[in-house]
Amino acid sequence: MAAKHCFLAKMEAKTQKNPEIVQAGLEDFEELKVLMRTANDYSLKLTGVPQWTAWDRAFGQLEGLLASGQVFIIRDNEGAIASSISYNFDSEYWGDITQDNNAIYFYKLMKDPQRSSADDAKQLLMFVAYEAIKSGKQYLRCDTLQELPKLIRYYEKIGFVQKGDFSIQSVGRRGVILEASAETVSANLAKMLHG
């Protein structure tokens, strides 16, 4: 009986959260800085690799993207539990390929490990894939650090293919760039989320 009660309490708490994906604004900047640091600390604990090290640069990018309406968050009654930035162009790592104007780029996919569910990142990625399809873009593109092979394998599992690598000389790190059909990612995530 106690196990059933505990299960029902967890289900009730989960349904009361009512998470939704919303566009973030500058008013969310401080909250997202905390989320970014929390996600970074979790990555460091889990993998030994911090996601971000150049905080001034990362926070400056975040603020600019918030101002331009390119940040989306999953928010519940307590605040942001996950976030992603999506935009149409990233020449820093992709070079000439971005001239095709046929992709949505997502960046800084992050979640609070204490408050988010295992599916929150998948839901955000599915949202980004849907936005790409809705806007007539064929591809999703992202980058990640070479030091995170488990994350690279996850992206490959949902349909991404490595398209190259890059160097972040200011912090002495290397990364990979990945690309996938938005429709393929959407279909693969739908299977993972809904069986």
Image (spheres, rainbow, N blue to C red):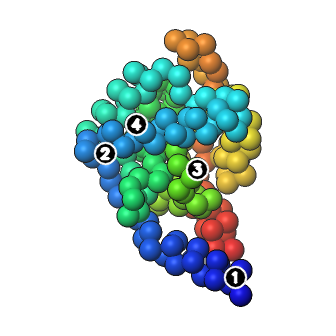
Where disc 2 sits, the SS reads helix
Does label 3 or label 4 sit earlier along the sequence? 4
Residue kind at label 3, given as amino acid type:
Pro
Residue kind at label 2, given as amino acid type:
Asp
Where disc 4 sits, the SS reads helix
Disc 3 marks which residue? 113
Where disc 3 sits, the SS reads loop
Residue found 52% across the figure and 40% down from its top: 38
Disc 4 marks which residue? 33
Camera-side residue: 166 or 174? 174
Q: Is residue 164 visible?
A: no
Disc 1 marks which residue? 2
Residue kind at label 1, given as amino acid type:
Ala
Q: Is residue 156 left or right of residue 34?
A: right
Question: Which disc, if any, is residue 28?
Answer: 2
Residue found 58% across the figure and 60% down from its top: 117
Residue 194 image point, x, y percent = 63, 73
Residue kind at label 4, given as amino acid type:
Lys
Mark 1 vs 4: CB contact within 8 A: no
